[in-house]
Amino acid sequence: MEEKELPLILLDAHLSQYSYVGGFQPSQADVAVLTSGCVPPSPPRTLPNVRRWAAHMATFSSVECLAFPPYTLGCKMDDQLSDLVHKNIKMSGEAQNSKKCPKNNKGGESGKGKSGKFTLKTPKGTRDYGPVEMAVRRQVFDTIYDVFHMHGAVEIETPVFELKEVLTGKYGEDSKLIYDLEDQGGEILSLRYDLTVPFARYVAMNKITNIKRYHVARVYRRDNPAMTRGRYREFYQCDFDIAGQYDAMIPDAECIQLVHQVLSRLNLGDFTVKVNHRKILNGVFGACGVPSEKFRPICSAVDKLDKTPWEDVRKEMVDEKGLDSDVADLIGEYVKLSGREDLLEKLKQDERLKNSTDAQAGLADITLLYQYCKSLGCDVHLVFDMGLARGLDYYTGVIYEAVLMAGQTSKGEGPVGSVAGGGRYDGLVGMFDPKKKTVPCIGLSFGIERLFAIQEQKQRAENEKLRSTQTEVFVAAACKGMVHDRLKLIGLLHEAGIKAESSYKNNPKILNQLQYAEDNAIPLVVLIGESEVQEGVVKLRETATRAEVTIKREELVLAVRQRLGKNS
Amino acid sequence: MEEKELPLILLDAHLSQYSYVGGFQPSQADVAVLTSGCVPPSPPRTLPNVRRWAAHMATFSSVECLAFPPYTLGCKMDDQLSDLVHKNIKMSGEAQNSKKCPKNNKGGESGKGKSGKFTLKTPKGTRDYGPVEMAVRRQVFDTIYDVFHMHGAVEIETPVFELKEVLTGKYGEDSKLIYDLEDQGGEILSLRYDLTVPFARYVAMNKITNIKRYHVARVYRRDNPAMTRGRYREFYQCDFDIAGQYDAMIPDAECIQLVHQVLSRLNLGDFTVKVNHRKILNGVFGACGVPSEKFRPICSAVDKLDKTPWEDVRKEMVDEKGLDSDVADLIGEYVKLSGREDLLEKLKQDERLKNSTDAQAGLADITLLYQYCKSLGCDVHLVFDMGLARGLDYYTGVIYEAVLMAGQTSKGEGPVGSVAGGGRYDGLVGMFDPKKKTVPCIGLSFGIERLFAIQEQKQRAENEKLRSTQTEVFVAAACKGMVHDRLKLIGLLHEAGIKAESSYKNNPKILNQLQYAEDNAIPLVVLIGESEVQEGVVKLRETATRAEVTIKREELVLAVRQRLGKNS
């Protein structure tokens, strides 16, 4: 049989059961099969599983492929397929790095018992959060919740999936990143892509005319994110939005104030809140001679300015989007500008913008926004940046983005970039209303995963150890056979609302118990021995100082509370 | 053209775009098409969308179908399909209830502009949570978190989806209820069905030998739940588990104590914690003469005792599961028993159980459990119930379930049933370990959605109004043109950590502002007019009493803090 023809149908059968050739995680076996010459660049529709796999493999870069673990037998495999894998692993292994192909793979099935590792993993682009990471997250969340409550925001929650049609037509070309659920008989569903569209759906569905709400939840994007930089396929968004027909710039100023408060409280160093206005951008485009049908594509070119030099953006405008180079140069003069109120005043007098209703309306808005921010005491970090455009189509007014200064210059890490952003979107709710009746909205979203990563890094740098438990007292026994006495003390302390733990062993060693309290930074230890039980007393030990005092049992709760600084 | 043949292919094309005939929610249009005689009971595979839709429609009862809203044009439809719908709507409308078929449907497209309602919804079995519901939830969660922290538990989080293979083979026949994600090129994924299997995967993957963790998150089951009784396809689970090799019954007693503490603190009335042991059940089955291969099916028959009378359970054992009727009768004698330590002692001496190693080991465990619970002060609600079996296969030791007594007898509501349950599962982690090395685990899960529903009901009954915001001060102005003065006060109060709001209008009416504070139970109002600003004072008003005092501006923060009982 031709080696090049046979295994495809086998491979398809194999991949109908497994995500990858080697089982449930990518390995050198996938690379081996891909480079064997057996798999055509575009597998036929009769091999749906090979098609899926090949398309998926194409999303990995060659660097990523090289980093796959070596293949170890993790799943059953047809002999012929196994032969193909091993033959090509050997070849590719030799070509790349012979260490990548462990010897015990050559033996085929025989190696399974000894070396066969069944590797478990979470889905691509996702991760588990362990206790320490959760503690950091709780800390960041609590700070943000506190600020949300400061503003009188209510909380809502929507389902993790929506009818697919709710999401359709809201995200432009990013729609391809939406996770669809399998059609298992029923409605056609997709995982939410952000929290803004479900919010607009909620407002329209419940005919709400005004609400100030926050929503903190995970969203899903079938992207190929750089996980090392804290970007995932499943990640938290932390949104605050104000919906309602209100007077100009008052809710907008509140959003700026809220960003200012959250970033100040998180204490992550200096930051800038860039602000711009879609009407100013449109006014500039119009005044520079951009035809109105090109406003959006040109706007999304400007959006790249924070990552791309002007020359490349200009090239995109001229070469890809067919703008006259003179027009592009003119735009360049404007989008490079940033400043504060002086710039606003200058632009109001600008010859080209003088007659642009849009530009003048936008400039008046930002001027008023500055005044309100001054009254609120949050104008110091506010920079009017004409190069800020924001990607999403649905913005209609003020737009803003907060950037941390720390880490911007450090070589290895690259810029931290935006940690919050948002703007006014007055038309989105209307897309869900049968009569197209809309509710003006403004909102912002914190890039919370980045904030977690920065906070973790900061705590590591400061050698700060965050506790993952809240235990206040550890109940220890100095001698054997005291498990009931320990449990009684636990019952007593819990009854008084004191957080207390003890060992799960009948006869734990005293040193291990004290070590546990120290390792977990539990501030107090209640220590008993036979004599203490007989005399109705306990020893109370402070973990930090190791100082011990003997206290009557009935005074224990009070003594613990005093030491913890708790009110009775 | 034959009316019976044509529309199927049209219908398929239509349903490739829409969830239902009428758009995105079921309506009388679906009933009309179903009853038109055009759709065969089992549509061919060439019509995948009709198949999906027909299978989905079959999940609705006739009562549910009758309750569908009338069809109003909510989406584009081919003329022939539209004719079919209208013809049959009229017919079915007349046959059932002519009022169900509104007149304006007859006009077809012409009715769209006027009456066409585009109805938005959340997916079947899901719901949004509004501000008031979220406030109830936060309250219940905070109580439970507090108890979890009391026990020194850490928090973890896992992805909302897992590799499909992680879930495979863990839920028996319930596996059909798992939501799969569409294969969009990549790994094959499913939404999590519970939090226990992801926990076991986490423990095995990270080679953890001991952990006490909680995890509160939503899980997904493609069930047909009774939403009116607080059951959904997307619902919260609230899990606490202890993994590790420890001395007998100490972690088990802690789980019982934790259930006791949570239910006591939630203050939902009297409750019972039923406890049993899989080894006792196995011992009883063996002693009564059940062949060992029938232990599991007989156990799952016993599991139905809480909802089904013994006679029906006996029938299942004999007729369906082929047990001798004498053996069934004998089992009946045991599973009806419930009591406390006296029953344990009696059973230890029972002639049949005397020689059962399993039964004696289980009885010894429960006896020790009682002793530990006594020391912990949580034995009062503990009932040894030999009819408790718990559905899941993976339990290996102690099992328990908490039942609220309130509502049990009231006619309309039916029993509240179980609000928490769990048990020991010593083998699950081993299913994920390459060397089958296991970590013994015990855990419990709160039926948190039921607890929310009960709490909501209780608060309605007690006419208790839960605030959905935490605002402490509303800043109001008595005259026009004071927006900047209000914002300055907001800035001042926020700076001092006081939760404060103001109106988004430039010139809000004073009565509306005071009304807002009253409606939202905001305890204090800071009131300014022109004279106050000139004199550097403010009026501080208590919303409840409407008492006002005039205070110097620089003393405002202190005065507010005092009234709120806050420490400076």
Image: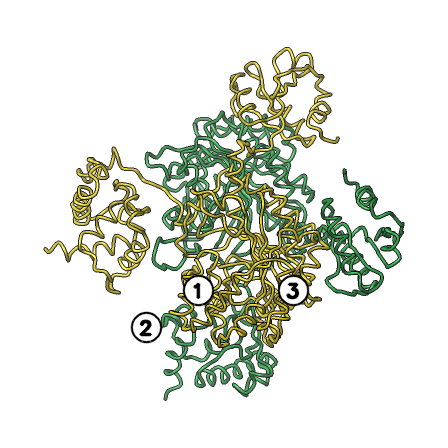
Chain colours: A green, B yellow
Labels 1, 2: front one: 1
Q: Amino acid at mark 2?
A: Thr
Under circle 1, the secondary element is helix
Check the image and report above or below for B24 versus A486.
Answer: above
- The residue singled out by tag 2 in the image is A46
Q: Taking A339 as reference, is A475 above or below it?
A: below
State which chain disc 2 sits on.
Answer: A
Q: Horizontal and vertical percent for residue B240?
A: 61, 56
Q: Relative to residue A147, is residue A31 drawn left or right?
A: left
Could you classify mark 3 by the number of other residues whose Cα lies within 10 Å: few (under 14), some (14-19), or many (20 or more)? few
State the residue in front, A46 or B252: B252
Q: Position of residue A279 (x, y in %)?
A: 46, 33
Looking at the image, residue A368 sits to the left or right of residue A563; the answer is: left
**Subunit ID for the residue under disc 1:** B
- The chain carrying label 3 is B
Is A349 or B204 nearer to us in this picture? B204
State the residue position of label 1. B175
Quarter of the rendering occupied by the C terminus of chain A: top right
User: Could you tell me which residue is drawn at 37 percent across and 39 percent down?
Assistant: A431
Camera-side residue: B242 or A328? B242
The answer to whether residue A353 is above or below residue A116 is: above
Question: Residue B345, labelled with which disc?
Answer: 3
Q: Residue at x 61, y 50 (%)?
A: A450
Badge 2 element: loop
Q: Which mark is residue B220?
A: none
